[in-house]
Image: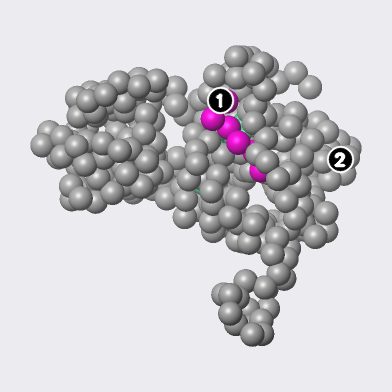
Amino acid sequence: MNLQATVPIHMPVLLEEAIEALRVQPGGRYVDCTVGLGGHAAAILERSFPGGQLLGIDADPEAIRITRTRLRPYGSSLVLVNENFAHLECICSRYDFRPVHGILFDLGVSSYQLEASDRGFSFQRDALLDMRYNPGQQLSAADIVNNAPEAELADIIWQYGEERFSRQIARHIVAHRPVTRSLELAQLVAQAVKTRGRIHPATRTFQALRIAVNSELQNLRAALGGVPKLLGHGGRLVVISYHSLEDRIVKEFIGRESKGCLCPPGIPQCICGHRPSLRPVTRKVITPSPAEIEANPRSRSARMRVAEHI
Ligand SMILES: C[S@@+](CC[C@H](N)C(=O)[O-])C[C@H]1O[C@@H](n2cnc3c(N)ncnc32)[C@H](O)[C@@H]1O
């Protein structure tokens, strides 16, 4: 099906690798927890034809609206849900969508959202400091930047941005409040960061604020928790992440779910009763090829992990 040229662009990252890792097959049933503009979703629908079904979730109503139009040719094979994937288990129960053959997460922000002139995700485009995936949510980046105490702002920038100049940045922001626009914030951060590296000085601060605004790490943990109950035997979990904080959560989750007893060392008899539910399919992360990075530089930080339900 030709789906080109109808909508804004997001080039799906690790597309072939993700479809192969999910082992998409005709008649299969899949969940795309971050359907975005439907790049991965379209490929899953193509390869699962005939009889395949896809449940696509996104917190962003605009992404759902665009994808609903774009993937209309797939008819009732696709169900789109505008919700937070933190409620994955609940959503699947509501749609009677379990067990499934595969679950995909392609985390973070899409190019479409980054480039939108009114979302405030980018330090290169002037917009109100928003950064919400779901505009119906109350908390925005402006709320955090203008209301958080200096120490809390520094902690957010340190923890979620792994930014070593977090304290200087927080101090400088607080001294210049109120800060309402993304370019204004980017400029303040650049002034506070004394050194110049490979990446834009505001990269880490913007990442930190986006993670905080959208509770990204908490939502990922909540969603992963439901995965073992949703996957059928041999079903695959595929997660593409874009920074080490997300990747660590995924790695630790798969590690824990691959183990039996989780009791602390020294306990003579198991009291946790934990049984392994997943096995890692690849020990190492899968990363984009040099050719993909050249064609789509935004893919360069992607890391994919795959696990199978046992
Ligand atoms: C990298 S994009 C996915 C792109 C998609 N794979 C494609 O090919 O078009 C990530 C998407 O996840 C969505 N998202 C991020 N966190 C979410 C959450 N907690 N719940 C639901 N959607 C979320 C964003 O709104 C964004 O559209």
Q: Earlier in the sequence, mark 2 or mark 1?
A: 2
Where is residue 29? Give x, y as percent.
79, 48
Q: Which labelled disc corresponds to residue 135?
A: none
Q: What span is colored magenta in the figure? A: 299-306
Please, what secondary structure does the residue beneath circle 1 have? helix
Q: Quadrant of the N terminus?
A: top right
Q: In this rendering, does residue 159 appear at all?
A: yes
Q: Is residue 296 left or right of residue 177?
A: right
Where is residue 221? Give x, y as percent.
53, 56
What is the spatial separation of the Cα atoms under label 2 and label 1, in whole angstroms?
A: 28 Å
Callout 2 environment at 10 Å: few (<14), some (14 to 19), or many (20+)? many
Where is residue 302? Give x, y as percent.
58, 32
Residue occupying the point 50% across, 25% down: 112
Q: Is residue 269 left or right of residue 117?
A: right
Q: Amino acid at mark 2?
A: Gln
Q: Is residue 210 left or right of residue 233?
A: left
The relative height of residue 116 versus residue 130 in the rendered view (above or below) is above
Beta carbon of the mark 2 residue lies under 8 A of ligand 1: no
| Foreground disc of the pair 2, 1 | 1
Where is residue 57? Give x, y as percent.
61, 45
The verdict on residue 57 being magenta is no
Residue occupying the point 24% across, 28% down: 193
Q: Quadrant of ligand 1?
A: top right
Of the pair 219 and 60, the residue shown nearer to us: 219
Q: Which labelled disc corresponds to residue 25?
A: 2
Callout 1 environment at 10 Å: few (<14), some (14 to 19), or many (20+)? some
> Which residue bears the numbered disc 1?
300
Q: Amino acid at mark 1?
A: Arg
Residue occupying the point 68% across, 41% down: 284
